[in-house]
Amino acid sequence: MKLSSKCVLAVLLSVVLLPHVASSTRAGTGDDNALAVVTHDLCHHHIVMLGESATHGDGHTEAFKVALVERLVNECGFDSVFFEANHDEFINIARRFRTGQAVSVDLVSSAIGGLWKFDREFQPLVPFLLEKAQAGQISLGGIDDQLSQLGQDYANVEMVTELTGFLPQQQRQHCSLALHRRIYDDYTEAAPYSKSDRSQITTCLSDMQRAVAADRTSDLAGREERQEMISATQRWIRRDFTSRAELIVERERSMFQNFEWLRRQQPRRRKVILWAATVHISKQGHSKREGHTGVNFGLFVHRKYGARAFSLGFSALTGSYRQGRRDFHELPVAPSNSMEARALRGSGLDAVYVGAAQLGAMGTAPGAFFQHSYETLPWAQFLDGVVVFRTEQPPSSTRAK
């Protein structure tokens, strides 16, 4: 990777003057040098996981991550980009690429989902990803098995029709209706979703799995894709009526299984970027939260891949964020001994990067890396590095008011 003299200076400062800390002074956002040093630090890893607050409503973080993804692909050879998004939607996109069908920006945006696709800060990433994927330079994927997301017509409608189509005629309509009702929560107060309903769906999915395995009208890749869709749906349904703690752990486990399946589909691809909430990609979950056991997706990844994996968190000292579609909130006042205050103190800079060594040296301190509230934790046990902005702001939505 070729760096400008400014970037080289920033790297030297991070190594010599402030070990594993870097910052930037770009006019406007002040992110350029920070981006250069973060890119340099992440470049040699094989799995880079980019977090964000659990509210998914931080515009500065999104813009920084978009620029970082582009640099990691262009400068460091990352060749897979996965999202905390529906697994089946992206399997459909991969199949369309494989069979020579058209894939549009709208199709990729729909697969990524409503958490990001309406944000102006995020939108420039989609045509970039599509162009690279069409050229065969990257593969795309989603790791979440949850159905019923708004606007995901393949997973919610077309996939059901496709998979139930392998069943005998007399069973097809019954199973299609059962899955449709579960996906759209189409139950009444008098007849709510029950364990009996789940049992019917479980039987349908098992029968579909056998029917798809026995099918010889499609190629092996097509059968494997359909079997994976069914397996992911089975894991989603299996969590119904479980405790909150079990639901969280099994969802995280399923995301890791989906991640591993995606990696196996591209054996020559070696470097993955994952875009998700920090609660999922941290090196371990926060066990002190209600319903949490400390087991999360990031724990599974770090257990298997060790130092090849990197979890990057984000936070800000001041500003505001969006929660949901229209709720806007000010960030809480940062404690004077917080990670955010200490990282920025005396720098006069808009963004700083704190790498692994410095993060460990800062010890246990308040930080707001999981969500917009301060928690006192030994952050080096949860993250390999963090980016701290002086100011955060909500994303700019393109949705109609």
Image (cartoon, helix red, strand yellow):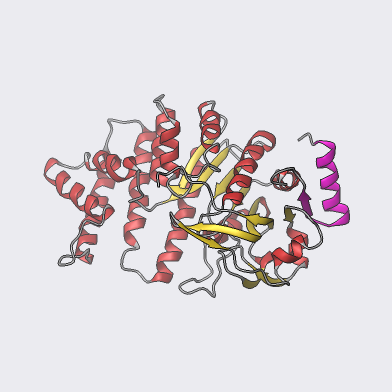
Residue 76 in the image: state x and y as whole percent.
Answer: 68, 38
Q: In this view, does 374 lie to the left or right of 208?
A: right
Q: Is residue 293 left or right of residue 215?
A: right
Is residue 44 visible in the rendered image? The answer is no
**Which residue reaches farthest right?**
16
Q: In this picture, is 225 found above or below 183?
A: above
**Start-end of magenta stretch:** 4-24
**Which residue reaches farthest front?**
401
User: Which quarter of the picture shows residue 7?
Assistant: top right
Measuring 28% from the left and 39% from the top, which residue is drawn there? 158
Residue 266 in the image: state x and y as whole percent.
Answer: 52, 37
Measuring 28% from the left and 32% from the top, which residue is drawn there? 216
Q: Nearer the viewer, residue 245 or 344?
A: 344
Measuring 54% from the left and 34% from the top, which residue is drawn there? 129
Q: Which of 67 and 350 is in front in this view?
A: 350
Quick check: is 203 in the magenta stretch? no
Measuring 41% from the left and 40% from the top, which residue is drawn there? 110
Q: In this view, does 108 lie to the left or right of 204?
A: right
User: Which quarter of the picture shows residue 40?
Assistant: top right
Is residue 346 visible in the rendered image? The answer is yes
Q: Which of 62 and 294 is in front in this view?
A: 62
Q: In this picture, is 135 found above or below 349?
A: above
Residue 213 in the image: state x and y as whole percent.
Answer: 30, 41
Q: Which of 384 and 129 is in front in this view?
A: 129
Quick check: is 12 in the magenta stretch? yes
Q: Is the magenta stretch mostly helix, strand or loop?
A: helix
Q: Is residue 230 left or right of residue 57?
A: left
**Which residue reaches farthest left?**
170
Placement of the N terminus among the 4 image quadrants: top right
Residue 201 in the image: state x and y as whole percent.
Answer: 23, 55
Number of marks drawn: 0
